[in-house]
Amino acid sequence: MFGITAKIWREQNPELKGNIRDYATINELICLSNMENINAIFIDQGIPQGERLVKLNKIAIEQMQILEDDKNRKLLK
């Protein structure tokens, strides 16, 4: 989701307290929550870990592109 492991993030940011999620954007947190839910469904369906990872990565990229697309965003009034 973030492009690096939690361990690497901690090594690169020793001065920061907490974990990588504490510094994530709202869009990253939304996407991460969705990925956790979808992963649970995939596990329930018996999809192997490697296959889940590939599928989740593709879905996460698509969701982040949608969430970050400000040009086509319609605001509620």
Image: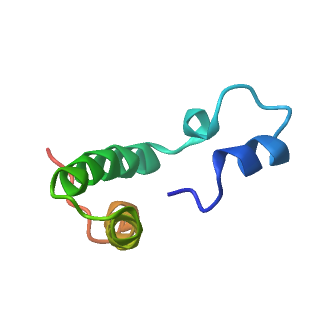
Q: Quadrant of residue 60?
A: bottom left
Where is residue 13? Give x, y as percent: 81, 41
Residue 58 seen: yes
Q: Residue at x 83, y 48 (%)?
A: 12
Q: Is residue 68 above or below residue 11?
A: below
Residue 62 seen: no
Q: Residue furthest top?
A: 17
Between residue 9 and residue 72, name the one nearer to us: 9
Q: Residue at x 35, y 45 (%)?
A: 30
Between residue 27 and residue 14, name the one nearer to us: 14
The quadrant the C terminus occupies is: top left
Q: Residue at x 26, y 63 (%)?
A: 73
Q: Residue at x 61, y 38 (%)?
A: 23
Report the number of numbered marks: 0
Between residue 54 and residue 64, name the one nearer to us: 54
Q: Quadrant of residue 67?
A: bottom left
Where is residue 10? Give x, y as percent: 76, 40
Where is residue 72? Give x, y as percent: 26, 70
Q: Is residue 61 above or below residue 33?
A: below
